Structures are given as C-alpha cells and as structure tokens.
Image (cartoon, rainbow, N blue to C red):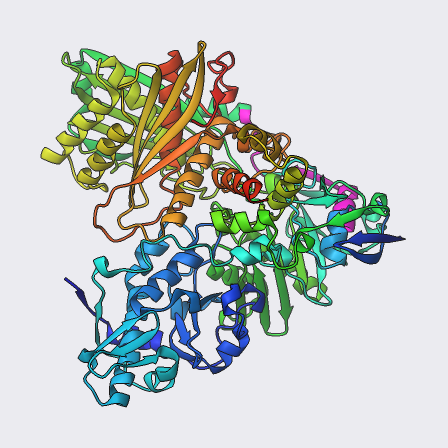
Amino acid sequence: MATLTKTNRRDFLKIAGTTAGGLFIGFNWMSCDSPKMEVLSTEEVLANAKNFNSFLSIAPSGDIVIYSPNPELGQNIKTSFPMVVAEELDADWSRVRVLQANLDTDKYERQLTGGSGAMPHSWERLRKAGATAKYLLVAAAAKKWEVSADELNTSEGIIYHKASGKKIGYGEVANDASLLTAPEEITLKDKKDFKIIGTPVKNVDNAAIFTGKPLFGLDFYREGMLHAMIQRAPFGMKIKSIDDAAAKNVTGVKDVITFENSVAVVGTSTWPLMKAKKLLNVEYEPDGKVESSADHDEIFKDLLANGKAEVKREDGNVNTAFKNAAQVVTAEYQCPFLSHSPMEPMNFFAHVEDGSVELIGPTQTPESARGAAAEVTGVAPENISVEITRLGGGFGRRLRADYVSEAVHVSKMMNAPVKLTWSREDDLTGGAYRPSVRYRFEASLDAEGNMTGYKLRGVGMNAGNSTRENNFPSGAVENLLIENVNYNSSITTNAWRAPITNFLAYAEQSFLDEVALAAKKDPVAFRLELMEKAKANPVGGELRYDVDRMIGVTKMAAEKSNWGKNSNVKQGFSVYFSHRTYVAQVADIEMENGTPILKKIHVITDCGMVVNPTGANHQVRGGVVDGMGHAMYGNLTFEGGLPTQTNFDKYRLIRMKEVPAVDTYYVDSGFDPTGLGEPCLPPTGGAIANAIFSATQRRLRSQPFIEQKEFTDLNLGIKRA
Amino acid sequence: MALINLKINGKAHSVDVEEDTPLLWVLRDHLGLVGTKYSCGIAQCGACTVHRNGEAMFSCITPAASLTEDEITTIEGLSEDGDHPVQKAWAEVDVAQCGYCQAGQIMNASAFLKMNPAPSMDEIDEAMNRNICRCGTYHKIREAVAMAAKSE
C-alpha cells in the first residue's frame, strides 16, 4: 500500500516558496561532480535551474541539484538525504549533484548534526519534497500532451506515456512544472518500489576527498585574511599577567591581543603563530576550582557514599527486595574524561564588518555559530551568514561554538577577515570533554536466580543525568531504584558521541553479565528472560525501548555468532538501545596457545529501514572501532586544571593493527529509518569486557582497559578473523 | 626569512619563509596545496603524509628548507585525474567517512605499494598503522590497499 500523507499546506509553501537565485550558493568547490556530470558546471546548472522547493532544483538539461541542509562530518548525511529526495522524485542518480546548503532555518528547520536525529526528523519531509516535485513534473507533461496524469509513469528522470509511446525528460518540463500549484496531499511510494533507497550509494564527495580538493574549514582561504591562534587559560584559572614581547618579535606576527580569558596571536600565516604562541609568557591564577584527576577519584567515592542524589526512577521497594535476597551482587564502574579529537582541529573563518558577520567553517550546529557571533558583536542574526564546510569529524565537539566566538572576537578586534586555527594541543587542552562518571550497581537475586531488585547510582562530572532511567532493564525488575548525583566541575564537558550511554552501556552490560553469572545463567538467556518479563508485564511507568525490537536483535546476535556453541571461542554479549536504534554485539575471543586473541565482533542492528547499506556499514563498523578504541585506550587525566595528555603521542587513539573483524547484520523490522551515527558505539565496550571475562575470568570495571591492573598480564592479542 | 626552492608535483616553486617552516605549512599557507592535512603536528597521525622521492614522509615535522634537492609529491600531484590505482581503489571501496585523514592514508598506501607491490594482509596492517583514522575506516582502508595491490 502506498502511503497517502497529508501535506501541511503552510509548511509546504514554506518549503516550496523559494526565491530564485543566490540563496543556495554554497562553495563552488563543494560540488560533487563525477566525471559523468562534467558537461555543465554546477554554476551553469544552477543558473538555469528551477527551484521546486528548499531541497531541489532541476535544470532544463535534466541535471538535478539537491541541497543537503545538515552538516556532514562523516555520518554520510550528504549522500543519504539526497538519496531519499531522489527516490521519491524518481531521479536518475547519475544526474544528481549535491550541494551543502548554508544556514537557513526558515527553510530547513533542523540543521544540526547530533543525537543521530537527522534521518528520523527529515525522512518524511525529504520524501515529500521529492514526491511533490515529481507530481508537478508529471502534471506539466500531462498538460503538454493533453492526457490525464494517471496515464503517465516516471523512471530515472523521464516521464513516459505508454499509450502514445511519448516520453520527455524532467528538464524539459521543469519550467512549466515550476509554475504549477503544489498539491495539498501527496502520495508517497510504497517502500517495496524503492530503487535508490536500500542500494549502496557512494559518498558524493569521494572524488574531491581522494584528490585533496579544499573541502574542510581548515582549507578555507580568502585573499587578505589574517590567521589567528589562541592561548587559553587552564580550567578554573584566569590571566594574572601577560608578557608578549617575545611573541610579538616573531617574523609574521602582526599583533597579540587579549579578550576575556584568551590571548590571541595574529599574523599572516600559521607557522609563525605556532612559534609565537610558545613564546607567550602568560601567568595564571586560580579563579575557581583548579582540579586534578586524583581529586576526582576521591570526590566520586565520597559522593557515591554520601552525595545527595536525585531519584530518577523508583519501582516497587528495593529495600524489601535486598533484605529478602538470597544473593546480592555489587560492583562499581568508572570512566575517565575523553577528548573528542576529531582529525581536523577546531577552526573557523569570521569576517565582522559594520552591521554584518560572515562565518565559514566546520560546525555541527550553524545556528549556534550564528548565535555566538550575534552575542559577541550585537549584530542581528539575520545579518549573520553561515556557510557550512565539510567537517573533519565532530563527535559532539563541534556542537559548541566556543571557537566560533573566538574567531569573531579576533575579526572584530583586528577589523579584518580572520581564520582561527587550533593546534592539536589546543584541541586536547581546550576541549569540552566526555565527562568522567562513576556508577554503583547493586542487584538482588532470589534462590532461583531471578533478579528481584536493581539499584543504580551514578555520579558524573557535569554529566547532567548520568543515567538512562527508562531504558532496559527498567520495566523488567519489580524493585528498582535509579539515582543520579551531579558534581559541578570547572572542566568544560559536552556531548561526546552517544552521550552518557558511551560508558553507561558498557557498565550496565558488564554488570548484567556479573549478575547472570552469579545467578548461574547464560548471559544471553538471562537477558532474554528479563526482556520477556518486561514484555509480558512491564513494571512501572514510561519505558523508552520497544522490547520486541530488543529481543529481535538479541536473538539474531545469538544465532549469527553461534553463541556458546564453540568451546574454543570465548564470547561476550552486549545489547543496548540508544538514539531510537537497537544494537546487539558479540565479541569473539579465541584462545591460541593459551593466549586470548580478540578476533571478531558481530553486530546486529535494528535501525529500521537501511537507507544506504554502504553508509550504514561505515557507521556500524566506525561506531564499533570508536567504542573499542576508547574503551581500550582512551584516557584524559588532569593536573592543575590542565590535561596531562596534550597530543596523540600520549592520548592514544585506536590504530589499524588494533581492530578486529566486524561482521554486520541488520534486522529488517519494517520501521522507518532511524539514525546510525551513535548507537553502535555504546555496546562495544561491554561485549569486549564480557568476552575478556569469559576467556580469562578477569572483570574490567574501569576504562581504559589497558591501564587496569587486571589487564596488565592478559596479553590480549587482536587479529582479524 | 629565506628563499627556498622546491620541486613539488613536478613544478618548481620558490617561497620566502622562515627557514624552520615545515613543508606542511609551506604547502598549505603559501602554495595553496591544502590537500595535505594538519592534524597533530608531531608525526603521530599521518594526515600530513607526502612523498619525498617516492617515499612516505611526515610533512608536519620536516623543514621545507631541507627538501630543496628532493622531488615532493602531494595528493594533488599523485595523478592527473584522481586515477592512481590507490585513488581508484579508495573510490571503489568507498573508504571515506569524514575524509579528513584520507589524503594522508592514500599517500602512505601509494608509497608503500611502490615498495611492496604484493603485500600480505599483515604487511598492509603494519604499513598503514602509522596513519590514524578517527572515524575508524580501517576495514575499508585495508580492503582498498589490497585491491590497489591487485590492480597495479
């Protein structure tokens, strides 16, 4: 059955009512021309194209331009969004070129990369954009041929009239179609008729990426612009005195300026600034809490024992359950701060002029970039433009606009266009980190090994709510208490890929493993038992997860991994729901001459319909590699308000030789697509830790694994199966 | 300041920079060759990899002044139309996520395959271990290097 969706007339007009010309011009170097498309330049296509709505324009040549509104940082949205539009349009994908749209919230509403939310937010509106344009093109052809639109078919950018044998390309009717009135209701395709969605489509920027074209913010250059780098204060400190004489003497340095708690060196190219920054002599003094990691450990212990907790969820009566327990299992888990460390350091171009600001660069939220510039300059938001470059990674770091503010400050003070560049050291020391968190879990078991009570108390450094109280296992346990304690740290923290769950999932799934083993039950069977209970008779109020989908990925994981069927393969299981997507993982450790070798991670994902299988595999494997890398190696410690690890020699990121095989499977659940940028990361640490326990009887309760005493003589090898 | 003569992608360039300026910043800030990336600046991540007389080199720690006798190749000069076997394999396998590290990965892989045209998978892992990909595209990098080796 095709879905008939009622279009909100006003909403549609807002999308459809585009003004011709100028509004969409992104960087001309951001186009994705493949060799096939080199007949016309993108400028030539745009010059003659008719806008059908915010998402697409069609040129008389039949070339189609699709605008991608959301920042692209590797989640592949710049390919998958246009696929959805092109699908409903019945476009010839080889004639589609994709442009990054600039910030325009009137047209696009949600121009944000975060929370794996783009696809669920835009799925229907992208489809409508394509379907509405197709409707108008068909209507124009019907009018031209004086036949009913019902008699016409479309395929790959061509309209056919079977009875007469006539056919015409979209480009030839684009002008007439653009003059017609859009329908109030539009019929969307039946999913089974999809020809583009569900097929592997390559990254539209491949050619530019693989030949080194300037795509990223750091690559931006404008004649006459100045470069800037900034020295920032340690967390909890402020500037006491500045001696900039030596820095100013460096050839290529134009000026050293100070604003707020920052000292900026400004010059004509980057290298002299890197040298000058090292010659700055800035003294700092305390201006709040000057923290160190050793203090944090003590604070965590104290707050777990004595902290005033906020109750996040309470079902039944845990006191009674624990009093009557046959067995109680307790464990504490802790994670360190982490840096986002995208490969492209923070940077932004700003040009403040009288009454306007031009911003160009990598941001996950261009609207915040605009807000930051408005705050610094007092310029009205409508006079601030934001062009979004490709992002060399983000992981949540570029949700903050601190570096945009800095670029604006310097441009304003220097009265010149400025490109601000952070060094890697700036990136690690001036971060906005994944908060450090400690959890205490307690479970009560009855004589039959049923989990009768479950307690979780989380303490986080600026973590907000460090729990996800309406996630599994809530709903499956009669007596449950989930509490949160927040500690206000002077260290800046921020969303980090899969916020909170990037560690909570590991801690919870490791603890549930401990409980299953204490109950003498198979870890998968134990979880399935809980899920069945939540399904049959859910305990308490709101639950965020769909228990059937959780059972679905769990069962498929057991099947695909041959769970428990090969005695030489020691396995660890983990399942987690986050960002609307369900993921189960099994890690396989094989014993070779008594040495445990991590060989493979099986990943079963239910993200609804898979829009682009090649992009999906990227996100699944990338999420697993990221989850594994940070669980194994990631650690950022503080001393006197500053990180101890200031570059990649000390701050360890996972490398090629440390990656096991990752097998990917998808559950075809029939649901509309949900996001994949984050949900595959959270379960990985737990799957690996549980496999390590299965192989070695060592329980890793803190990250990074390599720094735990239980890990030191494990000799864990990693090889792809 | 000193006038430094360099041969990059087959063309002679003359730049007036401080003598300690790393090749990376000469490429990026003075010659507009921004395909070579800055990421760590201390030869740990490989994003800045270029070829010096055909061998992979970290351009972030190598002063341009030390390279006046050498043939330098950057990602922009690896092939005429992006059709070097390694670039073709990268496109075929659809390697990139964010894409920032990939120029460095391609330059490392192409230098490696020139030295070792028929590597084992372990040798590929070893050679590519010096380049970090924060997005975790390692599986596809490995696949693409193996594919390029077969096609060469």
User: Which quarter of the rendered picture does the C terminus of chain A lie within?
Assistant: top left
Q: Nearer the viewer, residue A36 or A124?
A: A36
Can residue A243 be seen in this snapshot?
A: no
Vertical arrangement, residue A157 with respect to residue A466, above or below: below
Residue at image point 35% right, 14% down:
A568
Give the x, y percent position of residue A595: 46, 12
Q: Give the camera-side residue of B47 and A196.
A: A196
- Give the answer, above or below, for where A488 lies relative to A259: above
In the rendered image, residue A273 lying in the magenta stretch gets the answer yes
Which stretch did the figure color magenta?
A: A271-293
Q: Nearer the viewer, residue B9 or A372?
A: B9
Tell me where residue A283 appears, x and y as whole percent. Answer: 73, 39
In the rendered image, is residue A661 in sight? yes
Left or right, B59 with respect to A179, comes to right
Looking at the rendering, in which quadrant would you find the N terminus of chain A? bottom left
Which corner quadrant of the image does residue A484 belong to?
A: top left
Q: Is residue A143 magenta?
A: no
Judge by depth and name the residue closer to the eye, A628 or A353: A628
Residue B5 % position (x, y): 86, 53
| Residue A667 percent coordinates (x, y) | 25, 42
